[in-house]
């Protein structure tokens, strides 16, 4: 490493990868999403009053899936990102939002042959939310 900044960046990247790997292993073994890390309609945890404004709403029409988080968008509080993820952990689509965006809405093409899919929505204040995409 040429300097301390590069070393710190590399260290953070390795730590993030290691922790993400541990989360997916824990989820795969138990069949459940980790509590207190990922929130769902069934497990809103400490954010029970935030379900309506943070859980991604998923609509499937033909080969397209629309993900919408019915949440305001402001500098202080906004939806950061949507992703579509296969059961094996493969990220199939992603969209990043900015506080200046009018809404948190994204449209993705559904890949052929993938049946177990999840939509994620990440809020800058209220963490990661996951909804199952109906087959």
Image: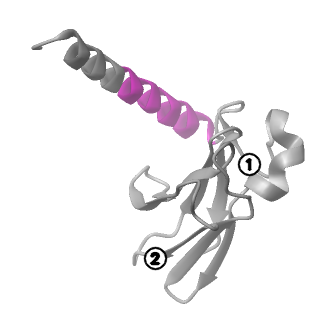
Q: Quadrant of the C terminus?
A: bottom right
Quarter of the image where one finds residue 53: bottom right
Q: Name the residue under label 2.
A: 110
- Colour mapping used in the image: one colour
For the point 67% across and 52% down, the residue is: 74
**82 relative to 22, above or below:** below
- Mark 1 residue element: loop
For the point 54% across and 63% down, the residue is: 116
For the point 63% across and 41% down, the residue is: 124
State the predominant SS element of the stretch in magenta: helix
- Mark 2 residue element: loop
**47 relative to 120, above or below:** above
Q: Nearer the viewer, residue 132 or 25?
A: 132
Range of residues picked out in magenta: 15-31
**103 relative to 54, above or below:** below
Q: Mark 1 points at which residue?
A: 40
Q: Badge 1: how crowded within 10 Å, few (<14), some, or many (20+)? A: many
Q: Percent position (x, y) of residue 130?
A: 65, 52
Q: Percent position (x, y) of residue 39?
A: 71, 43
Q: Which of 34 and 3 is in front in this view?
A: 3
For the point 22% across and 10% down, the residue is: 4
**15 relative to 97, above or below:** above
């Amino acid at each position: 490493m040429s300097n301390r900044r590069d070393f710190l960046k590399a260290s953070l990247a390795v730590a993030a990868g290691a922790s993400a790997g541990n989360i997916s292993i824990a989820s795969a073994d138990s069949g459940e999403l980790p509590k207190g890390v990922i929130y769902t309609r069934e497990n809103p945890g400490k954010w029970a009053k935030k379900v309506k404004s943070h859980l991604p709403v998923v609509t499937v029409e033909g080969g397209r899936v629309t993900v919408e988080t019915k949440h305001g968008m402001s500098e202080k509080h906004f939806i950061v990102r949507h992703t579509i993820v296969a059961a094996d952990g493969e990220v199939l689509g992603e969209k990043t939002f900015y506080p200046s965006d009018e809404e948190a809405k994204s449209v993705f093409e559904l890949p052929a042959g993938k049946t177990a899919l999840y939509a994620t929505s990440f809020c800058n204040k209220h963490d990661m939310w996951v909804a199952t995409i109906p087959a």
